[in-house]
Amino acid sequence: MSSEYRVLIDGELCEASTKETMEVVNPANGKVVGLAPKCGSVEVERAAEAAYKAAPAWAEVSPTDKAALFFKMAELLRKHREEWAKLETMQYGGPIFKTFNFDMTFDAAHFEFMAGVARAMTGKTWMAGPQAMTMTIRQPLGVVGLITPWNFPLVTAISKITPALMMGNTAIVKPASCAPLTVLKLGELAVEAGFPPGVLNILSGPGSSVGEAIVKHPHVAKVNFTGDSETGKRILALASAAVKPVACELGGKNAFIVMPDADMKGTVEGAVWGGFFNSGQNCGASSRYLVHEKVYDEFVEKFVAAAKLLRVGDPLNPETMIGPVAYKGHRDNIERFVARAKQSGAKLLLGGERPNTPETKDGCFVAPTIFGDCDPKSEIMQEEVFGPVVALARFKTAEEAVAIANDSRFGLCASIWTKDIRQGLVMTKQLKVGTVWLNQHLSIVFECPWGGCKESGHSKENSILALDEYSMMKNVWIDLVGTPATPWQGRF
Ligand code: NAD
């Protein structure tokens, strides 16, 4: 794999017109991994024109022919699996066990999944009365802008690109500035696979300039965004000027509810996974634990003991569970959250400072951190830290647990740990979130829909439902009796 990174515009791999670049820094050791082109409005204009020009012909490409390109992409991704997993790890710090086993498996399989399910998408027919028949036909939207974050750089981009292109849209993709390299490499594969010029365009550059220019561009019919809730609000506001739809997958502060009858061994394993996988940098991370008072002390003891065993260090070591967080500014922000939680009176049960080992000394590491006895209204229980920092509180009744869980501006997901599935389902109905797991946390597969409510966003990623985000239904009336009859004649 070459260590040069180019953007993709109109089928051409190129530099930014200014030749400016952005350094992508390995958060594990501070070394530069690669230089990404720093695009600006010139590149957005070129990409938007190319995508707009390519849209009508791409919309007419048969689903079978589109699928053939997708299968080629999956094949190429599998071929490069090892080196791509390594690049993903180096650019944002996700441990290699995750990037190799999860990300790279998902990346290739998602192309195949969407190539299959999108071909089964249909419209509908309705009988409007004796004089007419109506049907809906699914149509692409045109050019879509896909703006993605750094915590699953390639996975998130692919989970938007695949439904968008299969539904006949053309796309401009903008990955996060701190980790754009694998998405830029995807552009090389798209050229190799033979995508027509303009169908897929990939631009790296700052969100405030390139991201906003994509959102505002008149050729862009819809924006699909994953990222921080505050950025989502900004994008929604910008798009509203043109009544442009925006699909949003935003932040979360997800409850992990431990009922008194929970199987403690499985619950603790789930708690460690939910809170610390990918250093807690998951929108779906379990970041606030609501634990029944009867089992609180037992849970605390076992959870802290299990979290202590997590290997923190070089993310390229397959044994490592906790790599660095994505970049220095992000670590500083997490440390400020920790300092404020300490001041607020939350009880520090584990971590709370930088790990101090030869492996971690040059990187942006945060030790797994657990706060106990937290006030459910406090910042550490309410705001998304997006790092390996979790907060615990007690509850007395199921009603109280649901009330605390719902007392949040976010509504992404939650888990309930109980042997009483009836009780779990009653609580599931009451929780204001997009996903509930019973006795699991953070299980995400592309067959199932993903997405939240409230300030966590309102759209669906993955599954057959994601395809609805990228098509519009057009209603068509067919006269059955000859003009000038209308179907409501005789009804009023
Ligand atoms: P971010 O909002 O800072 O950036 C996301 C993307 O938006 C980047 O490409 C960035 O360059 C771009 N951007 C920034 N400002 C912009 C603007 N004004 N206009 C247009 N684009 C702009 O988010 P991040 O720090 O990269 O990612 C972490 C956040 O993403 C967390 O809040 C996390 O919960 C959320 N997230 C949500 C989901 C989900 O499915 N709900 C999944 C992953 C991450």
Image (cartoon, grey):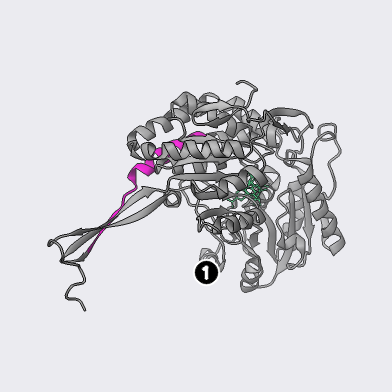
Q: What residue occupies the far bottom of the structure in this picture? A: 492
Residue at 71% across, 28% down = 33
Quarter occupied by residue 98? top right
* Residue 184 in picture, x, y percent from top left: 59, 31
Tell me where residue 382 appears, x and y as whole percent.
71, 62
Magenta highlight on residue 118: yes
Please give left or right for residue 136 compared with residue 328 in the image: left
Residue 353 visible from this viewpoint: yes
Which corner quadrant holds the N terminus? top right
Q: Nearer the viewer, residue 17 or 294?
A: 17
Which of the 4 quarters of the picture holds residue 175? top right
Looking at this rendering, what residue extends furthest in the left direction? 481
Secondary element under disc 1, as helix, strand or loop, is helix
User: How packed is label 1: few (under 14 Cα within 10 Å), some, or many (20 or more)?
Assistant: few
* Residue 421 in the image: above or below residue 329: below
Rendered location of residue 273, percent (x, y): 65, 47
91 or 399: nearer the viewer? 91
Q: Residue at x 74, y 68 (%)?
A: 377
Q: Please, is residue 255 above or below residue 34 in the view?
A: below
Q: Nearer the viewer, residue 289 or 87?
A: 87
Q: Residue at x 76, y 60 (%)?
A: 380
Note whether residue 110 is visible.
no
Q: Residue at x 21, y 71 (%)?
A: 488
Relative placement, left or right, of 65 versus 149 is: left
211 and 185: which one is in front? Answer: 211
Query: What amino acid type is highlighted by mark number 1?
Result: Val
Question: In which quadrant of the rendered image does the C terminus lie?
Answer: bottom left
- Indicate the position of residue 381 as horizontal and vertical percent values: 73, 62
Q: Which residue has dot 1 on it?
A: 426
Q: Where does the magenta region start and end? A: 107-127
Residue 35 belongs to magenta span:
no
Disc 1 Cβ-to-ligand 1 distance below 8 Å:
no
